[in-house]
Image (cartoon, coloured by chain):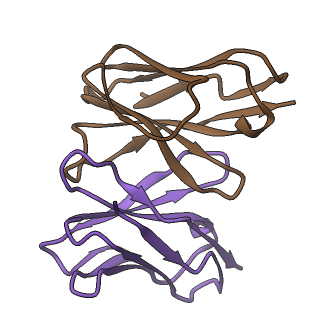
């Protein structure tokens, strides 16, 4: 069983398009995250939700809009894609936010904007 | 906020040798220090973690040490094998609701 699963794994799209990445976790965790990993492998948090409520919103363009329909799902919608959005996006979850709770990552979604 | 520095950025070792990766952190309130391994094309996976009430933890060939006074922690891999080749990330956090802050990663290559 995949604990944190995200789709699609690969996505190639043109500039200006709108795309979504879906994420689901079956660990029963309360907290979910989106991380961005650039070409240099830097892992940077974008958003965090706890029980469907946004608790962390880092400096991310408002073209990125997360949506959490329930605590097992956290989807990422990106409007008006730009070349600089090309990266690997990781969904993750933890039992609770912060406080030393282990974060479990999905396999990543490779986004290429051409 | 927390800032985590990780060194070296790349590391090559001969199979069977040891590898050491070091991290420093800035927030003295941090009390949780995990290490993640990311293989090519996959997401980061937790390999070992340590909390601030412990100075050292070992799991087979992997060990982590923590010096809270100096605010640094290290990952030690002994008897390295080619399958240890990956990118390794340290992280620090655990203070309230603030998320983990990750180091910039170390690309470890084990040469057979």
Q: Left or right: where does residue A14 sit relative to residue B74? A: right
Q: Position of residue A72 (x, y in %)?
A: 34, 19
Q: Is residue B47 above or below residue A53?
A: below
Q: Please, is residue A91 above or below residue B61 in the view?
A: above
Q: Please report the residue visible at 52 percent of the width from the left and 49 percent of the height from the top.
A: A44
Q: Which image quadrant for residue A2? A: top left
Locate the C terminus of chain B and report the quarter of the image it occupies: bottom right
Chain identity for the colour brown used in the image: A
Say left or right for A32 vs A66.
left
Residue at point 22%, 72% (across, down): B28
Chain B shade: purple
- List x then y, in percent, for residue B11: 64, 80
Image quarter of residue A13: top right
Residue at the extreme left: B53
Q: At 66% across and 46% down in the image, what residue appears?
A: B41
Tell me: residue A45, above or below residue B14.
above
Residue B84 x, y percent position in the rendering: 57, 68
Quadrant containing the N terminus of chain B in the rendered view? bottom left
């Amino acid at each position: 069983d995949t604990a944190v699963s995200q789709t699609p794994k690969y996505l190639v799209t043109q500039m200006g398009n709108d795309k979504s990445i879906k994420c689901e976790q079956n660990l029963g965790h309360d907290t979910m995250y989106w991380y961005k990993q650039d070409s240099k492998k830097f892992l940077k948090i974008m958003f965090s939700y706890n029980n469907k409520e946004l608790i962390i919103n880092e400096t991310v363009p408002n073209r990125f809009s997360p949506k959490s329909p329930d605590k097992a799902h956290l989807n990422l919608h990106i409007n008006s894609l730009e070349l600089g959005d090309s990266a690997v996006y990781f969904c993750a979850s933890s039992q609770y936010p912060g406080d030393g709770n282990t974060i479990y990552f999905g396999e990543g979604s490779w986004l290429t904007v051409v | 906020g927390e800032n985590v520095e990780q060194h070296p950025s790349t590391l090559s070792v001969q199979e069977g040798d040891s590898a050491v990766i070091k991290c420093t952190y800035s927030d003295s309130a941090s009390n949780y220090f995990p290490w993640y391994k990311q293989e090519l094309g996959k997401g980061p996976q937790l390999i070992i973690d340590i909390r601030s009430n412990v100075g050292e933890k070992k799991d087979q060939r992997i060990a982590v040490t923590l010096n809270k006074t100096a605010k640094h922690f290290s990952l030690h891999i002994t008897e390295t094998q080619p399958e240890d080749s990956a990118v390794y990330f340290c992280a620090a956090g655990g203070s309230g609701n603030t998320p983990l802050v990750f180091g910039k990663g170390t690309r470890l290559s084990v040469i057979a």
